Image (cartoon, helix red, strand yellow):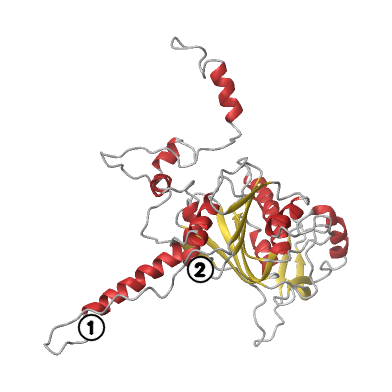
């Protein structure tokens, strides 16, 4: 977490330091868990693009230490409140007095577990966390898969050509994002390729019924990405946590119940989203392009694209082409268009991540819980100190 003026005005930035989180992004994962119950029956997790480790810190405190945040904390508070209300109206004693009922333990408990396995991967070094296995690797490189499989299963033979985990994981997380350039189309494209890299790793280690959560940048063609993920998961949601700034194009795609297509085998020899197969795909698709009144529509179950007749009219003087669809489907046929649900996560009455709040008079600014271990600007700061700061040598140096 940095110390820019924008961060100092951010309520979640200050709240993260007060609660001991490494970064404000921890609240994003907690709010996603409140909505989708991500940590239910989860013991094996892979955290991609994990630096500085805030999501891994959430996993460590929830799954390993047994602390309650997110949905578990909400259910615990709700259970205690219900028991307290029942205690006020307990059965009457013979003397006519009301005896409070004993508070029962919450129905949902998340106790510490010794069987939890969490692996965190990032190009940047990650400071140690209790129970977390950290790898410094590139998730876009094929050599990362053997390292990940070896970390998940120490008995894995690195010489083996198998790219499938012997003991699959329950949850794969990816909070990675590229260094934005300000060119939104370029940033969205690079982010989509980073998501494909995370998905390729997830397909190798995720068990059937598993969950996949990744950051995305929403753009005009992002619906295609949702439809592609729908081929592998039963449910695909787009979520915007309250702690994510509304001014940002970021969102999180939550994929539930991993169900690979029949006969599908994940392999990084032919990864998804890689462009070396683009020429073959273009040549194949060119044969199926609409000619003289055809349009292409997608089957929601198989993902195949079918042809449906349309009428095309061309203006004579300006060369403007008008396309008019002819809906020949029967009334009983289901709509073939699928739209991913968009969900706002977190308490809507909580802090607004885009708002500035007045600090109390006795406010004390805290240092970040975990300063950056190897920031890209570290070398620049050292050189500036060597040359006497931004404005040269001063009298005190």
Residue drawn at point x = 38 percent, y = 39 percent: 366
Q: Residue furthest left?
A: 95
Residue bearing the label numbered 2: 37
Query: Depth check: 15 or 119 in front?
Result: 119
Q: Position of residue 247 (x, y in %)?
A: 49, 49
Residue drawn at point x = 88 percent, y = 59 percent: 280
Say few, some or many: other residues with alpha carbon within 10 Å of mark 2 (under 14 / 14 to 19 / 20 or more).
some
Name the N-terminal-most of marks 2 and 1. 2
Q: Where 207 falls versus 46 (above or below)?
A: below
Res 90 label: 1
Residue drawn at point x = 17 percent, y = 82 percent: 98
Q: Is residue 82 left or right of residue 383?
A: left
Q: Is residue 129 left or right of residue 325?
A: left
Helix, strand or loop for disc 1: loop
Query: Depth check: 123 or 6 in front?
Result: 123
Q: Is residue 88 left or right of residue 126?
A: left
Q: Position of residue 286 (x, y in %)?
A: 86, 63
């Amino acid at each position: 977490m940095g110390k820019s003026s924008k961060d100092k005005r951010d309520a979640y930035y200050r709240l993260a330091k007060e609660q001991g989180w490494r970064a404000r992004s921890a609240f994003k994962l907690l709010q996603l868990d409140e909505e989708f119950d991500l940590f239910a029956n989860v013991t094996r997790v892979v955290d991609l693009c994990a630096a500085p480790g805030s999501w891994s810190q959430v996993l460590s405190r929830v799954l390993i230490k047994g602390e309650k945040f997110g949905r578990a904390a909400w259910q615990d508070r709700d259970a205690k409140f219900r028991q307290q209300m029942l205690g006020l109206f307990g059965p009457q004693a013979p003397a006519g007095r009301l005896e409070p009922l004993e508070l029962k333990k919450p129905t949902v408990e998340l106790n510490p577990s010794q069987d939890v396995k969490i692996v965190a991967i990032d190009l940047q070094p990650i400071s140690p966390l209790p129970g977390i296995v950290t790898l410094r690797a590139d998730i876009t490189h094929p050599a990362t898969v053997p390292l990940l499989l070896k970390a998940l299963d120490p008995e894995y033979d690195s010489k083996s050509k198998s790219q499938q985990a012997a003991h699959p994981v329950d949850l794969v997380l990816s909070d990675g994002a590229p260094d934005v350039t300000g060119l939104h189309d370029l940033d969205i494209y690079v982010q989509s390729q980073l998501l494909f890299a995370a998905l390729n790793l997830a397909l190798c280690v995720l068990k059937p019924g598993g969950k996949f959560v990744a950051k995305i940048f929403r753009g005009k063609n992002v619906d295609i990405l949702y439809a592609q993920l729908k081929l592998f998961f039963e449910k695909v949601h787009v979520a915007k946590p309250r702690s994510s700034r509304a001014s940002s194009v970021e969102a999180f795609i939550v994929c539930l119940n991993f169900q690979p297509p029949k006969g599908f085998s994940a392999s990084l020899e032919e990864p998804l989203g890689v462009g070396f197969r683009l020429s073959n795909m273009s040549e194949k698709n060119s044969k199926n392009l609409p000619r003289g009144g055809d349009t292409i529509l997608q089957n929601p179950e198989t993902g195949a694209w079918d042809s449906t007749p349309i009428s095309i009219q061309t203006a004579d003087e300006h060369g403007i082409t008008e396309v008019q669809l002819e809906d020949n489907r029967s009334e009983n046929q289901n709509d073939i268009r699928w739209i991913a649900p968009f969900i706002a996560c977190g308490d809507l009455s909580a802090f607004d991540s885009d708002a500035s709040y007045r600090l109390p008079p006795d406010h004390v600014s805290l240092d970040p819980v975990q300063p950056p271990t190897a920031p890209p600007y570290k070398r620049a700061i050292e050189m500036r100190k060597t040359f006497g700061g931004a404005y040269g040598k001063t009298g005190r140096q």
